[in-house]
Image: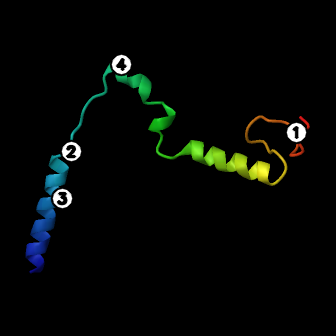
Amino acid sequence: MNKKRLFIGLITALGFTLTQSCTSVKGYQKMYLNDQEMSLSARSIDYFCINFQSYREGASGANGGKVGGGCGCN
């Protein structure tokens, strides 16, 4: 039974390996590779959380280029 499972697992892994597609990026598509949407993490969400935390605590830190405290007197 274990040899059968091993064989099926190997065949499945081999099938996944052989069915992957490798394509080249065309010249006009290269400008989209560095877009914010192409990043693996949601950095805009992280930036929003940092901004929200700094305003919630009452003082703006060095996270966004804004100056002044939380009182609103910039």
Residue drawn at (21%, 40%), measured in percent from left and top? Answer: 21
Q: Mark 3 points at which residue?
A: 13
| Earlier sequence position, callout 4 versus callout 3 | 3
Whole-number angstrom distance, CA of label 1 to CA of label 4: 43 Å
| Earlier sequence position, callout 1 versus callout 4 | 4
| Earlier sequence position, callout 3 versus callout 1 | 3
The spot of residue 4 in percent (x, y) is: 8, 74
Whole-number angstrom distance, CA of label 2 to CA of label 3: 11 Å
- Depicted 7 relative to depicted 35: above or below: below
Rate crowding at label 2 as few (under 14), some (14 to 19) or many (20 or more) other CA atoms within 10 Å: few
Residue 40 shown left or right of residue 21 in the figure? right
Of marks 2 and 1, the one in the foreground = 1
Residue 49 shown left or right of residue 18 in the figure? right
Rate crowding at label 4 as few (under 14), some (14 to 19) or many (20 or more) other CA atoms within 10 Å: few
Hey, what amino acid is under mark 1?
Gly
Residue drawn at (14%, 60%), measured in percent from left and top? Answer: 12
Of marks 2 and 4, the one in the foreground = 4
- Depicted 30 relative to depicted 66: above or below: above
- Depicted 28 relative to depicted 36: above or below: above
Q: Name the residue under label 1.
A: 68
